[in-house]
Image: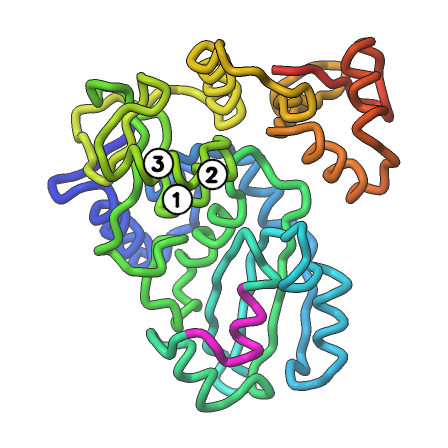
Amino acid sequence: KLIFGRKGPTEYSHKLANEQVKSKKPVTFKVINEILAFYPISITKEILNSLIKAPSILITDLDKNETKKILKDNIGLPSSKIQIPGVYIFKHKVTGDKYVGSSSHLALRLSGYFNYSHKPIGKFIPLLFKDKLSQFSLQVIPLINNYQFRSEIVLEQFYLLDPSFNLNTIKVANNPSGSNAKPLFMYNRDKTLLYYSSFQQIDFIKNLNISHFTFSKHLKNGTYYLGKYLFTREAELQAKIKDISLIKLALQLEKDRKLFNKNKPLNSLSRSVLMYLNEDKEENSKLFFSIGKCVEYLRNKGIPATQTTLVKYIDTGKTYQGFKFKYV
């Protein structure tokens, strides 16, 4: 159940987060679910434990050339086509003060700190500008095996609720503008049902295959995407949350697009592909919005693949490298 509170979803989340920090009580998955309900994100105890135990890289000499090589080997470059999501923690060597952040483009985000190009706002960045990188250590937690939600946000939220992270002025994850930032919502036409929400438009583009132009047009004009979905920044407090996973929502939208665009020709290489293990369970599935994206993913995993190969296995229904594929 999503409880917005009198002033709206983000304000209520900040209130919950600040109360949790002051209480110094252990952070549970239920606490995180309630704080991040406006996304909506819902995790289990097992998921939270797996994220907390994710391998990390500790770098103590940030001013040395070797640091850039370590980052490149583990998370790639800011210019890399495939960007790794994850969490990063800066710790001051003298005072022990700590700052945590997360990004779906980890290498790109960290380059801003190393190049001193982020705006000097809050507590941490002005301190970094003053004391320089040499006075900090950096712990990087790449989240390679990401879930169908942005798991880096969940792990960042876990650390934000730890009082020792005293350089973070905002205690709700993925809200860089503070409690005044307004999330984006995706409702049905009459706003009785909430399908999805996020602070970032890129999440709609990346996770739901909605183009930037299309999303912006419908958001600005208040028109209905595919004739049935409404994008808005205004929260509807009486709306029910649709109990649907991100991958199922993406699949639902793919079906809606087929019906809405049924008279438009579609090249087979531009069709969306569902990759799954033989069990065909949702947690073992991954959706790609073109065959090319699927091939790119497999190659980055060290699996040889071409578009021709993939089309062949889609058409035959046979298993390839332990996976099955089908058009959606």
**Type of amino acid at the residue the image marks with label 1:** Gln
Reading the chain from its start, which is encountered first: label 2 or label 3? 3
Q: Quadrant of residue 79?
A: bottom right
Q: Quadrant of residue 236?
A: top left
Give the image location of residue 173, x and y in percent. Answer: 40, 53
The quadrant of the rendering that contains the C terminus is top right
Which class describes the residues within 10 Å of circle 1: few (<14), some (14-19), or many (20+)?
A: some
Q: CA distance from mark 1 to mark 3?
A: 9 Å
- Near-viewer residue (293 or 5): 293
Residue 165 sits above or below residue 277 on the image: below
Q: Left or right? Give the position of 298 relative to 249.
A: right
Q: CA distance from mark 2 to mark 3?
A: 12 Å
Residue range highlighted in magenta: 109-118
Q: Secondary structure at mark 3?
A: strand
Q: Which residue is mark 3?
A: 197
Residue 164 sits above or below residue 105 on the image: below
Q: Which residue is mark 2?
A: 205
Q: Residue at x 85, y 42 (%)?
A: 302
